[in-house]
Image (cartoon, rainbow, N blue to C red):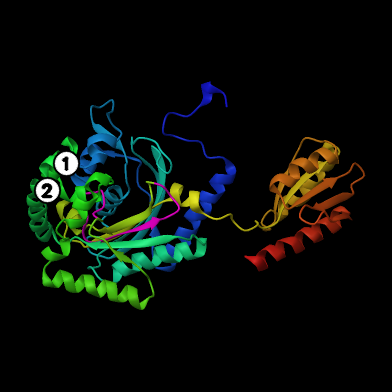
Amino acid sequence: MTANYQCLRGMRDIPPHQALRMQHIQCTFGEIAKQFGCLPVQFPVLESVSLFQKSIGIETDIIGQEMYGFEDKNGELIALRPEGTAGCLRSMLANGLIQRQKAKVFYSGPMFRRERPQQGRFRQFDHFGVEMYGYPSGGIDVELILISAKVWEKLKIPNLTLHLNYLGSPESRTSYRDKLKQYWEQYHDQLSPQEQQRAQNNPLRLLDSKNPDISDLISEAPRVKDSLASSELETYQAILSQLDQHGISYIESNRLVRGLDYYSDFIFEWISSDLGAQSTVCGGGRYDPLVKQMGHDVPATGFAAGIDRIESILPELPEKQAQIYLAGEDLSGILQLAQVIYPHRHQTATVNIDYLPGKLKNKLKTGSSHHSHTAYIYADGNIKVIHHKTNEANNYTIDNFMTWYGHLSQENNNAS
C-alpha cells in the first residue's frame, strides 16, 4: 500500500468482498424489520451538537471525549452523528410522524466517534437501527429481541448471548443512583481518579467497567431490581415470561447499564464470545424520558446493531447466484454480444463484460476469481462457456447462448 494514500487513523477502506458481506447483513436486517411492520427512514449525518449533548448526556465518554464536533462557517456548533437514536427521534418529531400516531422505523448508515482504534472499533462505523414509537413497555420490547434473534438465525451467526437488565423509571434510577454513590464512597480509595469522578457524577457507568481490579466490587454492588417499583417489576417479569415462551435464552445482568444516559426501564445487549473486548454486536432499550425531554410524552424503544462487528463473525456466505464474466477475441464480437444481452439485463444471472479483447487463457484467470462462468466469444461469433466449479465447457451460437442464459436466470429465480 502506498503511504500517501492511506486512510486517516481509525478509518478504513472496505474492499468489494467485505462490502458485499456488510451489504448482505444490512439487507437481512431490512428484510426482517419489514416483516415486523417497520418502514425505512433517513436523516442527516450532521446534526447540532446540542442534540447529542442533551440526549446522550454530558458526562458520557461519547460527549466528553469521542464526538466529532466543530464550528461551521456560520458559527454554529455541529457534529457528525455518534449514534442514530437522537437524530432519528428529532427527524420523526420534526416531521410530525409520532406525535399522534405509532410508528416502527429502521435506518442504516455511518456513525462517527473518535475512540482509540482497536479490533472491532473504528472511528467511522456502520449501524443498523430500529426505533419504535407509541408503544408502552412490554410486548414491543420483546419484538425488538425477536427481530434481532431472527437476523442471527438467518445469518447463521453462532455464539451470541442475550444480556438483559431493567433500569426502571427516572425516579427509580435516582433512588438507585443514590444507593450506588453511597456504595462507591465506601471503596473510594480502591478506585482510580477517573473512576472516583465517575462514581460521583455517573455511578451507574462504573457497573460497566472492564477494570478487573474492581470486578469484585461491581459484583457486590447494590442491584437495580431492589430499587424498582412493584409495577416496574411486573412489567419486567412479563417481558421475561414472553421471552421464555418464545424460547429465547437470556442472562439477567446487573452490570448492564448501556453507555448512553437516555436509556430507562428495559435494556438489552447481544454479546459475542467470538470477539475480544468489543464484544457487543447489538444493543438497545427504552428511552421514554428522552422523548419527554424533547417536549412530547411518547413511549419509545429501539436498538442499534454494529454492522462492522457482525461482519467480522459472519460465516462465509453461500455460493452466489450465477455470475457470468464475458470476454472475447476481438472488440467487434464483444460489442455484438453486449448489444444482444442489453434488453435482457432484467434477468437474474449477472453479466460482467470485459471490453478489452484478449486470449481465452488470460481471461479465464480473471473470470474464475469472482464469477461462476466465463463466456468467451471468438471472432467467428461462436461462444465457449466454462463452468468454473465443474470445469465443464460448452460451445454455443449467439442464439443458443441467449437460450442458455435464460435457463440460468430461471435457475437463479428458483434458488432465491
Q: Which mark is residue 184?
A: 2
Q: Quick check: marks 2 and 1 in contact, CB under 8 Å?
A: yes
Q: Residue 285: percent from the left, percent from the top?
A: 27, 59
Q: Distance between the residues labelled 2 and 1?
A: 9 Å
- Dot 2, how many residues are within 10 Å of its Cα: few (below 14), some (14-19), or many (20+)? many
Q: Is residue 245 visible?
A: yes
Give the quarter of the figure containing the N terminus. top right
* Magenta stretch, residue numbers: 257-276
In this rendered view, identify the residue nearer to me: 368 or 190.
190
Q: Left or right: 374 with respect to 269? A: right
Q: Mark 1 points at which residue?
A: 191
Residue at left 32%, top 61%? 163
Q: Residue 368: percent from the left, percent from the top?
A: 74, 46
Q: Left or right: 323 with respect to 184? A: right
Q: Does the magenta stretch include residue 272?
A: yes
Outermost residue toward the top in this view: 4
